[in-house]
Amino acid sequence: MNADEIAAGRARWQARYDAARKRDADFTTLSGIPVEPVYGPPEGVAYPGFDRIGWPGEFPYTRGLYPTGYRGRTWTIRQFAGFGNARQTNERYKMILGAGGGGLSVAFDMPTLMGRDSDDPQSLGEVGHCGVAVDSATDMEVLFDGIDLAAVTTSMTISGPAVPVFCMYLVAAERQGADLSTLDGTLQTDIFKEYIAQKEWLFDPEPHLRLIGDLMEYCATEIPRYKPLSVSGYHIREAGSTAAQELAYTLADGFGYVELGLSRGLDVNVFAPGLSFFFDSHVDFFEEIAKFRAARRIWARWLRDVYGATSEKALWLRFHTQTAGVSLTAQQPVNNVVRTAVEALAAVLGGTNSLHTNALDETLALPTDESAEIALRTQQVLMEETGVTNVADPLGGSWYVEALTDRIEAEAEEIFARIKQLGGEGPHAIGPMTSGILRGIEDGWFTGHIAESAFVYQQALEKGDKKIVGVNCHTGTIAKDLEILRISHEVEVEQRRALAERKTGRDDAAVRAAVDKMVAVSRTGENMIPAMLDAVRAEATLGEICDALRAEWGVYREPARF
């Protein structure tokens, strides 16, 4: 790019920066030196390939979505939390919000993630252990008691039974008196990554895609600010993928959901802004920063050039980040504070829109109040003390970071091409990327490549080529055992008792009629969300709704592979 083109770009950026709202804050170094909001090539100097880097707030968004960077608005501190019953988790949420958290992120227990009630025989011993138990809309009411759902953004990390859980969230908001059309937040809903990595599905892919398509339609017309899909790379990375695989598989899944929206006749400029992303921030500092920058660039280019988006917001890749749980160690767990801080800083320098920081004890148990506070304070130290919010994309133009960004992008593009080839000559009715994803799931292509990457890394650890402090080097310690959070068996006993009482006190005939109506709608081309909402309002449980759909659609069993 020649000097005149670079100067013109800077002038465009300056005009947008001047017109944008900025925070009332001190944008100087610790020593009082004023810093510019963004840096670029010296005036009058050409920079080959600068069009791939650009300016903040301009296509291809390598340097961020907004001309102000974090000077306009800092990232949302969104701590992931859930344990025991709804009342216990509600207390943790109030602690997080009271300590300065900006949004909530709900962790559900395993029975809820699998669409089963707390009194289901398969739930025995698991209720409340890896997240909060939610059986019906009443649990959602308790979960958010005293928290104004119209005023706080809420993320819910659940995919298989995401749609009925979302309906419970809407009914809880209704019972608060909220205007549902104004709700803001994110539902994960990403079923592709379940087949690829996390394994928490209910049905075959097709019925799940039916529900997701209905949800996209409903949110686009009824709750326009709500994001019905958070396409997740986090679980793919935690399963053992490389950074490039995480990026490529995640964005390919995102393209599949774009194809789903288009197949429903939706306008890409309307529904694409409702797609958000969820990435892992691992411990290799520069690789993660490059991954995030490449992600924005790839998404903007594909949405514009492949899927025909024309509005700026449709080209924006907005993403939440969680620091890497798989990087944490049970050995010398206090070291995990350092790992989390480095990973969080990488996410911030990569331009994340919201962030969760893991607690130091999460390899041993759910976080205690104290460890959760340390995780929260980690973000606040970065935000308030380090100066990282002063300059947009401060590593932009670094020879190393730019080369690594280009390398990861190129690897991702190679993977996209292979996924599309998997779809063969007769693509799925939804679209060619969807065809390749479904074939890759069926053939075990994704899981095989992730397993190979995990194996290669494990070999490097065991040979000592890769180091983990406290595990295969610097293993001596004077640290004492941590006090960890333990979930009492009484949580399950009480949840089952409360559920039985709830079932006794409701109108069973109304529940059965509403669930039967929902199943009848599933056999038509109608949108299922209104009928599901009616079932939830009647206090149908999550298990009852999911069991009715399992009876109608069957249960997915992953093929055995050797």
Image (cartoon, rainbow, N blue to C red):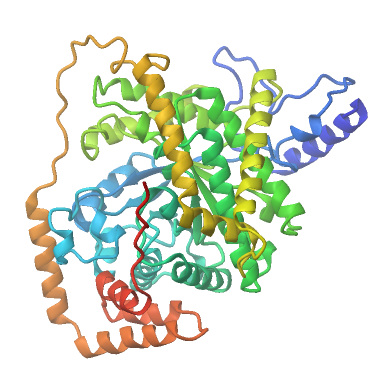
Residue 352 in sight in this render: no
Residue beneath the point at 56% across and 72% down: 217
Q: Position of residue 489 (x, y in %)?
A: 8, 51
Q: Is residue 33 above or below residue 138?
A: above
- Of residues 101 and 278, which is closer to you in this image? 278
Residue beneath the point at 37% across and 83% down: 519
- Of residues 449 and 547, which is closer to you in this image? 449
Q: How many numbered circles does the render carry?
A: 0
- Of residues 217 and 353, which is closer to you in this image? 217
Within the image, what quadrant is residue 85 found in? bottom left
Q: Is residue 436 left or right of residue 335?
A: right
Q: Position of residue 195 (x, y in %)?
A: 42, 54
Q: Position of residue 423 (x, y in %)?
A: 61, 58
Q: Is residue 533 above or below residue 383?
A: below
Q: Is residue 208 above or below residue 198?
A: below
Q: Is residue 6 left or right of residue 440?
A: right
Within the image, what quadrant is residue 560 found in? bottom left
Residue beneath the point at 74% across and 32% down: 53
Residue 315 in sight in this render: yes
Q: Is residue 256 left or right of residue 549?
A: right
Q: Is residue 316 left or right of residue 176?
A: right
Q: Position of residue 401 (x, y in %)?
A: 64, 23
Assign the N terminus to one quadrant of the image. top right
